[in-house]
Image: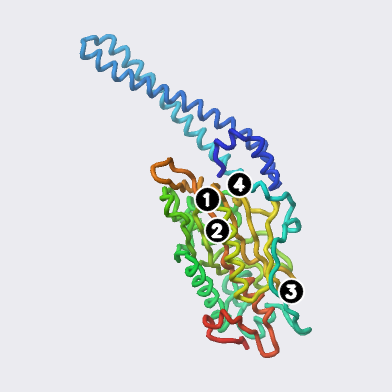
Amino acid sequence: MLQINIIRENPKEIIDRLAIKNFKAEVLVEKIILLDSKRREVQGKLDNNLAESNSIAKEIGVLFQSGKKEEANTLKARTAELKTITKELSESLQLTEKELNDTLVLLPNLPHPSIPKGKGAEDNLVVLEDGLIPQLAENAVPHWDLAIKYGIIDFETGVKITGAGFPVYKGKGARLQRALINFFLDNAVENGYAETQPPFVVNEDSAYATGQLPDKEGQMYHCGLDNLYLIPTAEVPVTNIYRDMIVRGDTLPLKNTAYSACFRREAGSYGKDVRGLNRLHQFDKVEIVQITHPEKSYNTLEEMKDYVAGLLRKLELPFRIVKLCGGDMSFASAWTYDMEVFSAAQQKWLEVSSVSNFETFQANRLKLRFRDGESKPQLAHTLNGSALALPRIVAALLENNQTAEGIRIPKALIPYTGFELIN
């Protein structure tokens, strides 16, 4: 959530920068400024009322002590009148603050000034390409055919049990999943991230705090009876660990990693791009989250991007890094890098990670602040990244490493899988 003082002091800049995300903010910004003005006016009247009430209360005591009961009773009548006015002002302030907050949460985060405008993925900027794209044999097939051939992923049984987008992993397919999760977690811990095992469901406050609500409500699975949400990523519960906290500045950065299953409705997804593992409703992912000092967050973003790139190199996967344009960025992000691996059998790039800096957008909702010494608390910056999401990693590993003998396992993974070949 954007800070109200920034909107009030820089309305034109807010409107212009949100236009980079193709978001028309004029009406909302104008409404926010009017509501904020009303809120401050009501707050001022309420404060004056309370101050007068306190002053009169002291004066009444003095008058009674000096025997001036008639004057004291006159002031008591004024006190009763002030109580009525105070109640009305308090109710008005509460309603105004709610309307202001409900409007504020409709504004996306501001993109960083360097973010280019664009309509979608076609306007993203490729900042790095790495690794050799494998040349497969003419009889090479996509991962959904390999899954059937080697009996490692059962899509049809998943449909029977639950529905499309919920595959069943079997045999070496299940072991490959477990190997990747452990590989990613071990690497994260070795790089200073504290491992966390969070809940896979969160309450409304948690989903709101990280920006999933109200923006992505239609994409989340909702447990209506308990009003809980299945998490779309471990970012949500992990970041909420720090909700309503003031941390010491000398403890920053705070680094966490977590494995979780992730649940996404993916409403409106259809066609060839959702086949096999390309787009699922439930999938496994290891997440990295950092809470940082505002002055260091963009250096942290680069470090996280380079860390994910290192994982892809260890997995021997050709990849590229793209900087997202405004039109392809998420609601909450100020700057996002996507990491894409090349799927040789499908002849396409598959997104496997996003690394984002949210600046103070999430922290403002979370009420997550830090304090240096005795200084006034200020909002921290939050960042997160997929390190990594498994489905498309598995798809690329299967497709790119298929041979006549079977599917070759990358050297770095063999200690985790316990086998060198899927055959």
Determine which residue is flagged by label 3: 346
Mark 1 or mark 3, which has the lower sequence index? 3
User: What amino acid is labelled 2 in the image?
Assistant: Asn
Q: Is residue 88 left or right of residue 30?
A: left
Determine which residue is flagged by label 2: 384
Colouring scheme applied when the structure was drawn: rainbow
Mark 3 or mark 2, which has the lower sequence index? 3
Question: Crowdedness of circle 2 by 10 Å Cα count: few (<14), some, many (20+)?
Answer: many
Mark 4 or mark 3, which has the lower sequence index? 4
Of labels 2 and 1, the one closer to you = 1
Of labels 3 and 2, the one closer to you = 2
Cα distance in 3D space between marks 4 and 1:
13 Å
User: What amino acid is labelled 4 in the image?
Assistant: Asn
How many numbered discs, if any? 4
Q: Residue furthest bottom?
A: 405
What is the quadrant of the N terminus in the image? top right
What is the quadrant of the C terminus in the image? bottom right
Which disc, if any, is residue 109? 4
* Residue displayed at 59% across by 82% down: 411
* Residue displayed at 21% across by 11% down: 66
Which disc, if any, is residue 259? none
Cα distance in 3D space between marks 4 and 3:
35 Å
Give x and y (percent) for residue 2: 57, 42
User: What amino acid is labelled 3 in the image?
Assistant: Gln
Mark 4 or mark 2, which has the lower sequence index? 4
User: What amino acid is labelled 1 in the image?
Assistant: His
Locate residue 35: give its quadrant.
top right
As displayed, is residue 352 above or below residue 214?
below
Q: Secondary structure at mark 3?
A: loop
